[in-house]
Amino acid sequence: MGRYLLRRLLQFIPVFLGTTFIVYTLVWAVPGDPFAGKCGERQCPETFVSLMTDRYGLNDPLVVQYFTYLGKVVSGNLGETFSGVSISEQLLNSAPITVRLAIVALLIQIVIGVVAGVVTGIRGRGFLDNLVLVSTLFLISLPTFVTGSVLQILLGVEWGIINPTVSAEATWGELIVPGFVLGAISMAYVTRLTRTSIAENRRADYVRTAIAKGQPNRRVVFVHLLRNSAIPVVTFLGTDLGSLMGGAIVTEGVFNINGIGGLIFRNIAEKEGVMVTTIVTLLVLVYLLMSLFVDLLYAVLDPRIRYD
């Protein structure tokens, strides 16, 4: 297991460097004045542009800029925006809200998606299976902003069950409906993945052997069938947590949540390249860490993988 972990960590480094360099290049190599609009409707004075260019090293080659920036990030210095706002403070205020939202969305995916997939996979064809398949197809076909807007109008405006927008505290209770909206499409995929995997493994030799040995039905399902069917679902859930962190822009916009998604949206509109680069770099790191965690979980679920 130790050699497997070391090998995965060594693969982690070039992927991180390559991905973040592409992100940095896309943000900073785009033609145009990075300080446009920073001085109101007037053009910024030459002294201001010269000072900011020197502060952010924009005259250096792109590779030098990237590794200088990466060195600061690794040392914990995330820097400031062009307007002098601390990026660390902005992230500390916004990240906990998005993390809570992503956790709510992930729990909804696991509880509803996995349970519905296991039940329909075991029961096979029938009314419940058709109902779940139609429901998941309906959720997959709806864009996130449509699902969010419909639930916001029905539950918040028409029926008064929830507040149409989330308060600044963003409590767990307030995040249930936005979490459902954020995780709805992935929940449908989890249901289908689980159902298909359970249906395939239900007829496998090891399941028939367990039944023939007289093991209780609950043990056959939870110990043998569910464990061996979990690998594709775990893969999807692990990588999806990283996607949820970055994909919350629309959901946070609909429900007026002050999280990472809203922060990205505002800073893209304001052309704050430092903030956008830092947030995306951290999201890449979260995504890669979740992928690493999933790979390690593979080795636990199926020990043969660690010896490949």
Image (cartoon, helix red, strand yellow):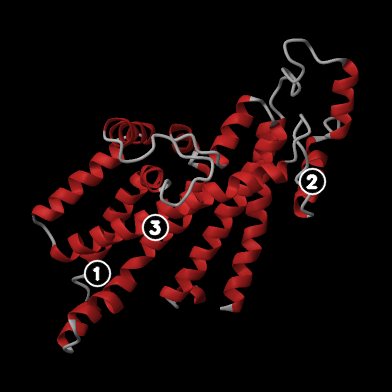
The residue pinned by badge 2 equals: 67
Secondary element type, mark 3: helix
Instruction: Mark 2: give few (<14), some (14-19) or many (20+) Cα within 10 Å.
Output: few
Q: Is residue 293 left or right of residue 155?
A: right
- Spatial CA span between label 1 and label 3: 25 Å
Q: Does 60 sit above or below residue 215?
A: above
- Report which quarter residue 87 is drawn in: top right
Q: Which quadrant is the N terminus positioned in?
A: bottom right
Identify the residue at image location x=79%, y=46%: 67
The residue pinned by badge 3 equals: 107
The kind of residue on which mark 2 rests is Phe
Secondary element type, mark 1: helix
Q: Earlier in the sequence, mark 3 or mark 2?
A: 2
Q: Is residue 268 left or right of residue 308?
A: right
Most distant residue in the front direction: 160
The front one of 11 and 267 is: 267
Q: Earlier in the sequence, mark 1 or mark 3?
A: 3
Identify the residue at image location x=40%, y=43%: 178
- Label drawn at residue 262: none
- Give the foreground label among 1 and 3: 3
